[in-house]
Image (cartoon, grey):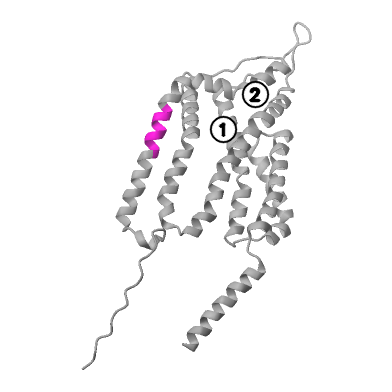
Amino acid sequence: MNASLPVKASPPLPPDDPDSHSMPLLEHLAELRKRLIYSIITLIVAFFIAAPLSKDIYAFLAAPLAHAMEQTGGSNQMIYTALAEAFMTQMKVAIFAAAFVTFPVFAHQLWQFVAPGLYKHEKRAIVPFLFAAPVLFFLGGALAYYVVMPMAWKFLLSFQTLPAAPGDLSIQMMPKVSEYLDTFMMMILAFGLAFQMPVLLVLLARVGIISAHTLSSKRRYAIIIIFIFAAFVTPPDVVSMMSLAVPMLALYELSVIGARMVGKKPEDDAADGSDSDGEDTDFNAA
């Protein structure tokens, strides 16, 4: 008679193991829906708070242009040419302000949805980049607002021609409120995204997709891509383009240093290979 062998129970999974709390697809979709609802409700509340303040917010956004107009002379006013243009611009300002304020909420809800599917060491690797990304975005936007825009607007306003005598033709800029807002948002977004380059490159080096050697050897191509990117996303003037390209070049060099610090080293790969070989040897021996 054959005796039944006892079945060895598998040890319980640790609570931080993604397999310990797996969910079916429908539950994942329900969780995603809940996170989106929280984020959208927060955005709507922030919009209704920012809407009455949209004029003051727009005045703050237009302050670099107002100072440049005051320094260069000429027309110190903005215009709108469609009946609903000023109203729609104020609504866009409110949406822009609400999205900026509630971005941490969106990021937190996204992290709460993704984090349960990550292992503990994966969370430890990603968390520093989650804190660095918004800080760098804010630094990029601050650089655009406080440094680049005053210089760029002053340079562009220098092409005005003021009348030297009665009867002379004057050429003055009278910017539209909607066009200025679009240009402002494009500049802030461009500088904020450009400052995410170190986060992306160092993270790719951390997971082993690229290396510091690759970044160093491809530096000449990176310089060309950076200048093309700066030329496309900034106003058509040399001041704005160089103001974005030079910081991006510096950030690229910092990315090389960061990739060298966090990237995998050859001895680490050799150690991993020796461990796997040892496991295979033990298995064959068994």
Position of 102 relative to 121 (above/below): above
Left or right: where 69 falls relative to 116: right
Q: Which residue is at a point 56% across and 30% down the rendered structure image?
A: 182
* Marks 2 & 1, CB-CB < 8 Å contact: no
Residue farthest toward the bottom in the current orientation of the protein: 1
* Residue numbers of the magenta segment: 39-47
Q: Quadrant of residue 273?
A: bottom right
Q: Secondary structure at mark 2?
A: helix
Residue farthest toward the top in the current orientation of the protein: 166
Position of 141 relative to 226 (above/below): above
The answer to if 55 sits in the magenta stretch is no
Neighbourhood count class around disc 2 (C-alpha, 10 Å): few under 14, some 14–19, many 20 upward: many
> In the rendered view of the protein, which quadrant contains the N terminus?
bottom left
Residue 181, given in percent of the width and then of the height, sits at: 56, 27
- Residue that carries the numbered disc 2 in the rendered image: 64
Q: Nearer the viewer, residue 217 or 205?
A: 205
Amino acid at dot 1: Met
Q: Earlier in the sequence, mark 2 or mark 1?
A: 2
The answer to if 44 sits in the magenta stretch is yes
Q: Which is the main secondary structure of the residues drawn in magenta?
A: helix
Residue farthest toward the left in the current orientation of the protein: 1
Residue 20, given in percent of the width and then of the height, sits at: 36, 61
Q: Which residue is at a point 70% across and 29% down the rendered structure image?
A: 152
Cα gap from disc 2 to disc 1, whole angstroms = 13 Å
Amino acid at dot 2: Pro
Position of 196 relative to 159 (above/below): below
Total tally of numbered discs in the picture: 2
Image disc number at residue 185: 1
Q: Quadrant of residue 216?
A: bottom right
